[in-house]
Amino acid sequence: MSEARAPGIVLRGGAMGLADAVPGVSGGTMALLLGIHPRLVRALAHLRLDTLQRGDWRALDLGFLLLLGVGLALGLFVGARVLVVALVEAPRLMAALLLGLVVGGVRAPARRVSWDMGAWALALSAGALAFLVTVVRPVAVPDAAWFLPVAGAVAAVAMILPGISGSYLLLLMGLYEPVLAAVAELDLGVVALVGAGAAVGLLSFSRALHHLLEYYTSGTHAAMVGLLVGSLGRLWPWRDAPGFAEGAPTLPSGGAASLTSVLLAIAAGWLLVRALEAAASGTRSETEKGT
């Protein structure tokens, strides 16, 4: 891996961390937008004892994972301290910006799909699943330390699965605010328990996802498209409650100035994705090879 690429990998990890801090936004979606999702899944899938024993360092891609992990940790910390404030102060504009990002990101996996009847069925099924996740009400979970690794494992699966938000799953379990506060305040006990579960979840699920991407490329990307589209409802800017992604969607309101600002935020998100894709287009193939 070229040293010149190291800052870019850290920045991509930071963007994933920021995304993972926001309920309704998936770090997997951000990885897909930034062109590192295949390499991330492949590297995690090869992180096994037998690969270590063989010394297959190219397959392990440890440098990439380490740099990405540093960026992700920094992004989570910044997201916990700063981004959440923006979600409270300007929830409608933040939702609009994120909506534009996700809409812009649909094109990347869609271009890898052979759109036959099977692909459409997978996309619709995955979209329905993502939509159902966004309308589920919070559930009661055990208030005990042993459940924190379980919650971390569940949330971590969403970190590499586009369209499903790990933070939102924590929100459903009633653990989003406690975990976010632990990250912001560097409560190492809580962070370690959640992190341990997240590591297990990532390593376990990444192998299955890598297999699907390797042998069922079209169908897997069709499901990703469905997950992205199905998650859009959670990011609809106009809702009947004041908080970010809270309450039920409503028709646009607030006057012409408010409508204009929301549309501009959506456009900004969409243009940001286009800019990211343009910047990555010249280097994506080399990045995925793990040079």
Image (cartoon, rainbow, N blue to C red):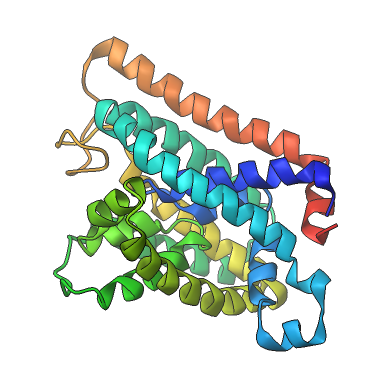
Task: Say which of 123 and 276 sits in front.
Answer: 276
Position of residue 193 measured from the top left corner of the image (x, y, whole percent): 36, 70
Q: How many marks?
A: 0
State the residue in front, 38 or 235: 38
Looking at the image, residue 16 lies above or below residue 204: above
238 to 197, vertically: above or below: above
- What residue appears at the point 26 percent right and 42 percent down from the top-left corner? 245
Q: Can residue 123 be seen by looking at this rendering?
A: yes
**Residue drawn 33% across the image and 65% down it:** 189
Question: Where does residue 185 sit, x and y in percent of width and height?
Answer: 31, 47
Asked which quadrant contains residue 230, the reply is: bottom left
Q: Quadrant of the C terminus?
A: bottom right
Quarter holding the N terminus is: bottom right
Q: Is residue 16 above or below residue 236?
A: below
**Residue 21 x, y percent position in the rendering:** 39, 48
The image position of residue 262, as x and y in percent, is 36, 23
In the shown orientation, is residue 176 left or right of residue 281?
Answer: left
Q: Return the residue nearer the eye: 138 or 79.
A: 79
Q: As drawn, is 194 to the left or to the right of 224?
A: left
The residue drawn where x is 69% and y is 77% is 46
Q: Is residue 278 above or below residue 288?
A: above
Res 11 → quadrant: top right
